[in-house]
């Protein structure tokens, strides 16, 4: 998936400068569409539909550690993804380009920013974690630093916890690492993309075993977000159009906010989005 997207993204990135001031809503929407973070995205339609079917089939890799009160059908998942993410709602459209509605992305970012502002006002305990360590970690770190500067406690735990995975190519050992107080997993050498819920489960268990309070707000994605939401921790997540689990969880009340976006871009491509959130939250 990443290799297939790289050429298109490189072409879109040429000549694009990063704004030094927060964009307006209209400017951010234009930017999201121009880059492909929203609008016509690089995640193919066939990949989206394949992941929706795997979720309906209760494939753990695509459930992100979540359980659902409703026994979702494929048609229902597609309808919800059309409503919450903006993918094409026609079941007969099975191949080609799919979409994320940029207005839905910005609506979710605004709800996300408003909850960050509340966390700052209350000086809440916060936690950040990502299954996209080379893509989203720097954005999370910027928000984490801003909240810490306003008196929020940044919660970490279970550093060094390890587990085995069987759904990915070797090496199969994954280790929880906190990098700039943002949780990621590595294979002992390199940071690794991860869908699994095991790291967040271990983090929450470690806090409980040591008598430490759980976070009052988690900002995460993939299995980090799913496991936190499943445990009842107030959670906001980011999800691509081929990752329906967090959208279903938001619909069922297990997540506060799920932001739809293409989550495979380079760190610097998310800077305008990052700035927009910080400005709305009063964290600049």
Image (cartoon, grey):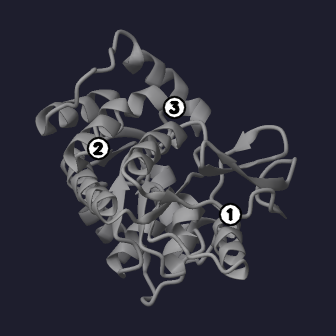
- Residue 64 versus residue 256: which sits nearer the camera? 256
- Residue 72 versus residue 146: which sits nearer the camera? 146
From where the camera sits, is residue 24 visible? yes
Q: Position of residue 234 (x, y in %)?
A: 42, 73
Q: Residues within 10 Å of mark 1 (few under 14, many from 20)?
A: many
Local SS, label 2 = loop
Q: Which residue is mark 2?
A: 283
Q: Is residue 95 left or right of residue 183?
A: left
Residues marked 2 and 1 touching at CB (< 8 Å): no
- At horizontal 27% and vertical 53% (from top left) the residue drawn is 113
N-term-proximal mark, 2 vs 3:
3
Local SS, label 3 = helix
N-term-proximal mark, 2 vs 1:
1
Q: Which residue is mark 1?
A: 157
Q: Is residue 270 left or right of residue 156?
A: left
N-term-proximal mark, 3 vs 1:
3
Q: Position of residue 73 (x, y in %)?
A: 43, 80
Q: Quadrant location of residue 85? A: bottom left
Q: Residues within 10 Å of mark 3 (few under 14, many from 20)?
A: some
Which disc is residue 103 wearing? none
Q: Which residue is mark 3?
A: 5
Q: Nearer the viewer, mark 2 or mark 3?
A: 2
- Residue 190 versus residue 30: which sits nearer the camera? 190
């Amino acid at each position: 998936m990443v290799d297939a997207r790289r050429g298109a993204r490189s072409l879109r990135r040429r000549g694009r400068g990063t704004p030094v001031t927060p964009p307006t809503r209209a400017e951010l929407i234009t930017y999201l569409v121009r880059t492909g973070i929203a609008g016509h995205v690089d995640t193919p339609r066939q990949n989206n539909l394949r992941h929706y079917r795997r979720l309906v089939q209760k494939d753990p890799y695509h459930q992100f550690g979540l359980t659902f009160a409703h026994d979702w059908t494929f048609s229902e998942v597609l309808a919800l993804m059309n409503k919450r993410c903006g993918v094409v709602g026609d079941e007969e459209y099975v191949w080609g380009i799919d979409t994320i509605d940029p207005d839905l992305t910005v609506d979710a970012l605004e709800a996300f920013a408003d909850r960050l502002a509340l966390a700052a006002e209350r000086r809440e305990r916060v936690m950040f974690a990502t299954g996209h360590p080379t893509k989203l970690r720097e954005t999370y770190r910027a928000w984490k630093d801003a909240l810490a500067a306003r008196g929020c406690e940044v919660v970490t735990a279970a550093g060094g916890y390890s587990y085995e995975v069987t759904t990915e190519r070797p090496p199969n050992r994954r280790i929880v690492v906190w990098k700039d107080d943002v949780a990621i997993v590595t294979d002992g050498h390199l940071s690794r993309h991860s869908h699994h819920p095991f790291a967040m489960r271990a983090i929450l268990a470690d806090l409980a075993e040591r008598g430490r309070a759980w976070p009052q707000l988690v900002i995460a994605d993939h299995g980090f977000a799913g496991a936190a939401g499943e445990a009842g921790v107030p959670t906001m997540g980011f999800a691509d159009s081929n990752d329906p689990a967090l959208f279903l969880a938001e619909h069922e009340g297990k997540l506060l906010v799920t932001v739809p976006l293409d989550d495979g871009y380079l760190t610097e491509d998310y800077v305008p989005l990052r700035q927009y959130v910080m400005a709305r939250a009063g964290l600049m």
